[in-house]
Amino acid sequence: MNIGTNQITTTQTFAILGSTLVAVGSFTFPRALATDVGTPDMWMSVILGGLITFLSGLFVVKLSQQFPKQTFFQFNQIIVGKYLGWGLSLGFIIYAILLGSFEIRAMGEVTKFYLLEGTPLSVLMICMLWVGTYLLAGGINAMARLFEFIYPITIFIFLLVVMLGIVNFEIDNVRPVLGNGVMPIIKGLVPTLLTNSGMEFLLVWIAFMKRPKQATKVLRWGVFLTVFIYFVTIIITTGVFSVERLQVETWPTLSLIQSYEFKGVFIERFESVFLVVWIIQIFATYAVCHYIAALGVADIFKLKYKKTVYFLLPILYVVALAPSDLNQLSSLGSVIGYISISFSLVIPIFLLIITKLRGLKSE
């Protein structure tokens, strides 16, 4: 796609990145981390994982800045040739489809269970898909403006309803510190890194930035705020439930919000407010994935962007219905996380090394 007037500001890029990083993980992350770590030191895994995410993001930023106004789908062929580059692009598209389908299915499962019990899962997913398609028809500018508006609001509400859980907080549940050494913290890096899926999409967003030199700033604040959100979530949920209880909670964050009640205020139960905010963030992540996949298909097959947006609709729907239950959906999430690590760390480092060795750089 010709970048042309399809440019986004630094703030809009930050909103897109942040909206992608904070998604389904905010619901399931405490349970996954509690299962792998098994100690109250989970918050240390969050901080260490955030640092690794930021360092890997620097490779993504550095690689993309070598080829201004070119997306991953374009500059990878310059680096490794047409056929291998085509294969990398196809892999990136498949990854975006898998992640987008995963978000749609997770949204449908939670909405059906907590809000619309009698509504068929397929109806919920189709509604989300069509709303997303309507948004994406306007291109990246429409999506960026929407995310710029909703991101600060949703993050504020999310942090507010989570931190209200401090009324049931017990300090003994987050003790002792380093009681079992550092190995549990290391084990917690895997679910932490898997939860940070979405940072690799900077391989595309930087090409659209009006000021691509500020991409490092976007990365820094995007990762910092995401780590802060997960840090607060882990501390509060651990303090309220304990590590042992978190290991058996299906949706720990929602259970946290259901555990407290403020009588006499306008809203006594906050889980509905949280679910609305969470669904908006899920929609944002899905929309990003749909856009990336459509952009990639349009680029490598030389098609019009809007046609590829509609073309991918049934594919996203079918993939979203593939997992038969929540266990299979969780397994799909783990697979997606490992693919994310490949595109956020392994492949960017590989391409950056080749770029330096061959002295490649787009003027």
Image (cartoon, rainbow, N blue to C red):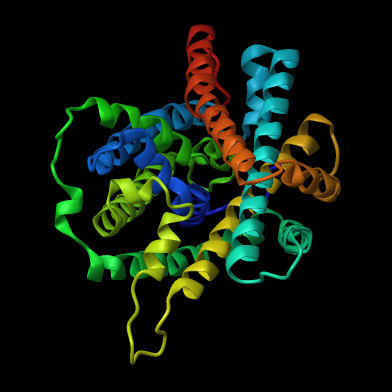
Quadrant for residue 99, please give it: top right
Residue 133: x %, y % from top left? 76, 58
**Is residue 284 visible from the viewing direction of this image?**
yes
Residue at 46% across, 41% down:
195
Q: Residue furthest top?
A: 357
Image mark count:
0
**Is residue 1 visible from the viewing direction of this image?**
no
Residue at 53% across, 33% down:
337
Quadrant for residue 79, please give it: top right
Residue 295: x %, y % from top left? 73, 41
Residue 358: x %, y % from top left? 54, 8
Quadrant for residue 312, please give it: top right
Say if 281 sits above or below 292 in the image: below
In the image, 3 versus 12, the foreground residue is: 12
Residue at 41% across, 58% down:
253
Say if 183 sits above or below 26 in the image: above
Residue 264: x %, y % from top left? 33, 92
Left or right of residue 278, residue 83 in this image: right
Q: From the image, which quarter does the C terminus lie in? A: top right
In the image, 272 versus 202, the foreground residue is: 272
Say if 247 sits above or below 68 in the image: below
Left or right of residue 105, residue 203 in this image: left
In the image, 204 versus 194, the foreground residue is: 194
Residue at 74% across, 21% down:
86
Q: From the image, which quarter does the N terminus lie in? A: top right
